[in-house]
Image: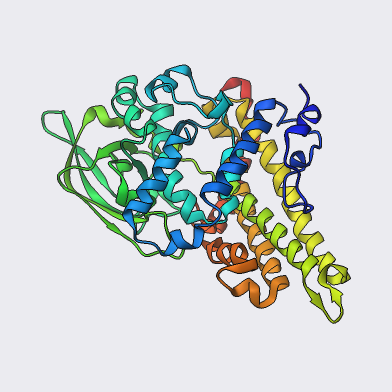
Amino acid sequence: MSSSSNASLLTRPTVPFAEAAWHAGLPNPYYTKRSHYELREWLLKWVADNLMDIADEWEDSSDEEQRKALFQKFVDAGFMLPFALGVKIPERFYKMAGGLKLPGNVEPSDIMLDELNRCASNGLVMGNYGGTAYGAGPIVHFASPELQERILPDILTGKKRICLAITEPNAGSDVANVSTTAKLSADGKYYVVNGLKKWITNGIWSDYFTTAVRTSGKPGEHKGISFLVIPRTKGVSTKAMKMQSAGSGTTIFEMDDVHVPVENLVGKEGEGFKYIRMTIVYVALRFARGDIEDATNHANRRVVFGKKLIEQPVVRHQLAHMAREVEALQAWTESLVFQQSKMTIEQSNVLTGGSAALLKAHSTIVLANVVREAGLLLGGMGLTKGGAGARIERIYREVNALMTPGGARDVMLDAGIKQAIKTIRIDPSKL
């Protein structure tokens, strides 16, 4: 069935460029299945019912019962499987989750992250999404079947939580500088882990930490970095951090002679560096569209000097620049995701790594431009928590919280070009 024939399923946008073109029923080469449209509509309602009105409250709340209750809603909705596995979910993982699937058994996709971030609170979404998505991903793709069977069922059913622990005080965008050590015990049964991780999303609530450790080599070398799944056990301590982007459980995670079974190694020793992934671009794209929506709605309401703002050419000019940047970002995002969906993991890591780094940087640059212009259009309301400018004000505070994690902007720009130069002559069929 074509995308255009599915258009009748859609809640159509009322603001231009506030949504991707396919949301308005226009043909799209990627979103062609009925399930894409059904999932989007279901998520639109779920977010409206559960997230839209609590973003500011979530940022300021220390109510643990409220946090647990919302996380359980994410679990009950069937989100843990697609959070952990992305779009393609083999049947054996459904079995691990007790057969739980999304409503109507529709297939998951990147539509999920786009719609969840409609609430314009990275802290709220990442507080319930980030740990599972980043922490379980390496286990799903690279761990042994034994490790998967031992850990994933509790993660996929929400009984346990997990996070990804890579960043250190001296190893942020430069992941090769990881200095946390994992030394094999004399009997070969354990790794003894020592080190400090910082800015770890969801760490304060996690039962497991998928941790980048150095099993050989020295800081600054890509080789020798491995992934270990470290349980919350003796020698593990965590401390919550107060962050600009609140609500995501950002944590200092310290390991002091922690004994971790060798069976908890993810993949092979020394190959952890190539397993690191990110999804920040989806968040930036949805945030930018939310800025356009709220700024346009305000321009249609606000009367200044006897005219609505939207009647002023300079205002329309601002909106046009916002729209052209967001539509270009959408096209690049869809193109790259399509390429990756047609490749093996190894091909994708090698051949699209540079583009992914550039896209991550570009998406946050676009967002910074768009939210700045949206805030200026709203004037004082763009600086006010609550009311018509609530999403714009919240997004404005979170721009740097997207631009820095997962690889700082300037590091990603340089890394992207270096990777592209390095891989341009590689034949995909040879990988």
Residue 221, compared with residue 319, is above or below; it is: above
Q: Nearer the viewer, residue 41 or 28?
A: 41
Q: Quadrant of the C terminus?
A: top right
Tell me the residue at 30%/29% (across/down).
151
Q: Nearer the viewer, residue 313 or 297?
A: 297
Q: Quadrant of the N terminus?
A: top right
Tell me the residue at 56%/30% (across/down).
108
Give the quarter of the image for residue 135. Answer: top left
Residue 415, compared with residue 298, is above or below; it is: above
Q: Nearer the viewer, residue 300 or 127?
A: 300
The figure's colour scheme reads rainbow
Q: Residue 385: image x %, image y %?
A: 55, 70
Tell me the residue at 53%/55% (across/down).
411
Q: Residue 396: image x %, image y %?
A: 58, 66
Q: Is residue 427 left or right of residue 303?
A: left
Q: Residue 382: image x %, image y %?
A: 64, 71
Give the quarter of the image for residue 332. Answer: top right
Q: Is residue 220 visible?
A: no
Residue 129, compared with residue 312, is above or below; it is: above
Q: Is residue 120 visible?
A: yes
Q: How many marks overall?
A: 0
